[in-house]
Amino acid sequence: MTLKVFLVEDSAAQCAYLTQILKLEADVDIVGIAETEHQAIDWLKRNPGRWDIALVDLYLGEGSGAGVIAHCQDRRADQGVLVMTNHAGNDGLLLHCKLLGADAVYHKATQLDNLVAYCNEAAARLAGCPA
């Protein structure tokens, strides 16, 4: 089953790269893209059931991914929130993301394989298949 991913990323190059990787290596459909915290929260309010995974960059040019994560606290149990950052080695930051409700945190440069694996496992769960 195709996983519906909402992508929050302010870098056009990173957004294009993530979209390409996820479409090539996982069964995903990018159902929405936002560049700012405000755009992301607005999209989420208008599309509460249209996504399976929110993939959120923590540091945005306008606003913060933390605000997006906090907004997702009332999501359905089967919806996941994943964080991408270049600061994944910061234990305090990782804990903060988890406390806000993030399911996982991935380093953009070194953990894309883990992100793809998470998406593949989530798609298999949606399809009712073992991962």
Image (spheres, rainbow, N blue to C red):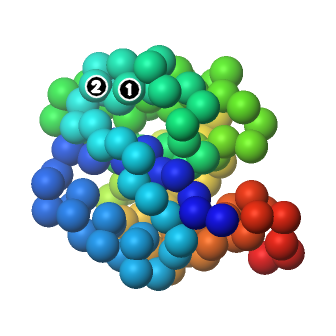
Q: Is residue 59 above or below residue 49?
A: below
Q: Position of residue 41 (x, y in %)?
A: 40, 22
Query: Which amino acid type is marked by label 2?
Result: Gln
Residue 126 in sight from this viewpoint: yes
**Counting other residues with Cα less than 10 Å from the Cα at mark 2, is it few (<14), some (14-19), or many (20 or more)?**
some
Query: 48 or 87, which lies in front?
Result: 48
Residue appearing at x 52%, y 52% in the figure: 4
**Counting other residues with Cα less than 10 Å from the Cα at mark 1, is it few (<14), some (14-19), or many (20 or more)?**
some
Query: 130 or 55, which lies in front?
Result: 130
Which element type, helix, strand or loop, lies under badge 1? helix
| Distance in Å between CA atoms under marks 1 and 2 | 6 Å
The image quadrant of residue 128 is bottom right
Residue that badge 2 annotates: 39
Q: Are marks 1 and 2 in contact (CB under 8 Å)?
A: yes
Q: Position of residue 12 (x, y in %)?
A: 14, 54
Residue that badge 1 annotates: 43
Q: Position of residue 47 (x, y in %)?
A: 49, 27
Query: Which amino acid type is marked by label 1?
Result: Trp
User: Which mark, by number, is residue 1?
Assistant: none
